């Protein structure tokens, strides 16, 4: 919806103070389109196989009306290759001649071609080999800092989320269940779903211990969600809530601390008694 690929059915979405939830991408102006760009999950499907890398970046510059002529855009294209740490000779290569990590760097260069102020990064490293994930993640962080770009980073990998994010929103079946700063979300009190996610983070360091939480039940259908709390069919703590409220009522967002919110029926005393999922061994 931020990108204009879908229209919002409810709520609001604003970009740089402008209402955009009902304006699809083909109805948006150049400034609006160039202001928010996306780095897609699969770099193998997002580049045109018949065009050179350089031409694809120049095409983005043409769409965003960057540069006054072909020479200006050619110089800007080479500067973008420098920015994402690709050799300039890659401008003449076709996507099939690049590795997955190199293709994703081209996608990042294209996203930043129009000086985007917001970049949506949708699982940008999940399709890459582990050996190149860290390099691409570091590149995104470097570009974000250098360009002062707001980045919406979408991922199921909480270790990367903790490394890259200032604020974290945890969602389940389309509902926001926890939101706060990175330190707040990765420390108790947790939403039960966040607690389970943290217990699933792979850790090789033997000096670190963690709670082991196994969720029972199947993931409900988003098309036919359960009544009450969206997580109630798998929650490991719902027996702590009286009168089956979890099955009957959708919890409201509960303020736990400054800008830290949970959507949960658990009492403040129970949440306050939670212990860290991950901690250094004694």
Image (tube, helix red, strand yellow):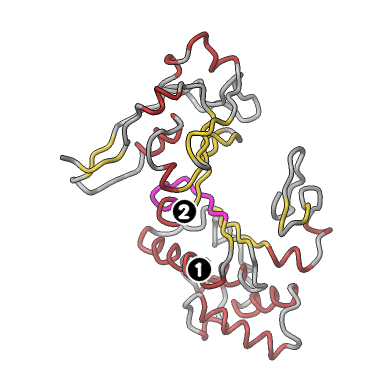
Mark 2 and mark 1 in contact (Cβ < 8 Å)? no
Q: Position of residue 255 (x, y in %)?
A: 53, 33
Q: Position of residue 17 (x, y in %)?
A: 74, 57
Q: Position of residue 8 (x, y in %)?
A: 75, 43
Q: Residue furthest top?
A: 243
Residue 69 drawn above or below residue 150: below
Q: How many neighbours does mark 1 have within 10 angstroms: few (below 14), some (14-19), or many (20 or more)?
A: few
Q: Position of residue 110 (x, y in %)?
A: 62, 71
Pick the front one: 139 or 13: 13
The residue labelled by disc 2 is 126
Nearest to the eye among marks 1 and 2: give it: 1
Q: Name the residue at 41% across, 20% down.
A: 237
Q: Name the residue at 61% across, 35% down.
A: 174
Query: Which quadrant of the figure has residue 211?
Result: top left
Q: Residue furthest left?
A: 282
Residue 76 drawn above or below residue 13: below
Pick the front one: 41 or 178: 178
Find numbered disc 2 in the image and state the secondary structure of the residue it sits on: loop
**Residue 153 painted magenta:** yes
Magenta segment: 152-161
Distance of mark 1 from mark 2, alpha carbons?
Answer: 22 Å
Left or right: 166, with 15 as reference point: left
The residue labelled by disc 1 is 145
**Quadrant into which the C terminus falls:** top left
Find numbered disc 1 in the image and state the secondary structure of the residue it sits on: helix
Pick the front one: 44 or 50: 44
């Amino acid at each position: 919806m931020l990108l204009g690929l879908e229209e919002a059915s409810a709520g609001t979405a604003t970009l740089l103070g402008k209402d955009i939830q009902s304006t699809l991408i083909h109805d948006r102006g150049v400034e609006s389109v160039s202001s928010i760009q996306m780095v897609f999950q699969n770099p193998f499907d997002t580049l045109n196989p018949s065009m050179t890398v350089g031409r694809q970046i120049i095409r983005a510059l043409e769409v965003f009306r960057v540069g006054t002529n072909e020479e200006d855009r050619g110089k800007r294209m080479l500067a973008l290759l420098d920015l994402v740490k690709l050799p300039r000779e890659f401008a003449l290569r076709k996507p099939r001649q690049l590795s997955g990590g190199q293709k994703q760097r081209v996608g990042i260069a294209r996203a930043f071609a129009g000086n985007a102020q917001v970049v949506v990064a949708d699982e940008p490293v999940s399709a890459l080999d582990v050996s190149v994930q860290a390099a691409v993640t570091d590149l995104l962080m470097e570009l974000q800092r250098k360009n002062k770009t707001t980045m919406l980073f979408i991922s199921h990998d909480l270790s990367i989320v903790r490394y890259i994010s200032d604020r974290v929103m945890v969602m389940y079946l389309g509902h926001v269940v926890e939101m706060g700063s990175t330190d707040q979300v990765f420390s108790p009190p947790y939403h039960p779903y966040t607690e389970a996610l943290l217990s699933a983070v792979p850790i090789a360091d033997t000096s670190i211990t963690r709670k082991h939480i196994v969720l029972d039940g199947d993931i409900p259908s988003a098309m036919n969600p359960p009544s009450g709390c969206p997580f109630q069919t798998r929650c490991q703590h719902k027996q702590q809530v009286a009168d089956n409220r979890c099955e009957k009522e959708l919890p409201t967002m509960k303020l736990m601390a400054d800008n830290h919110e949970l959507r949960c029926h658990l009492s403040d005393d129970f949440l306050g008694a939670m212990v860290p999922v991950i901690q250094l061994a004694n």
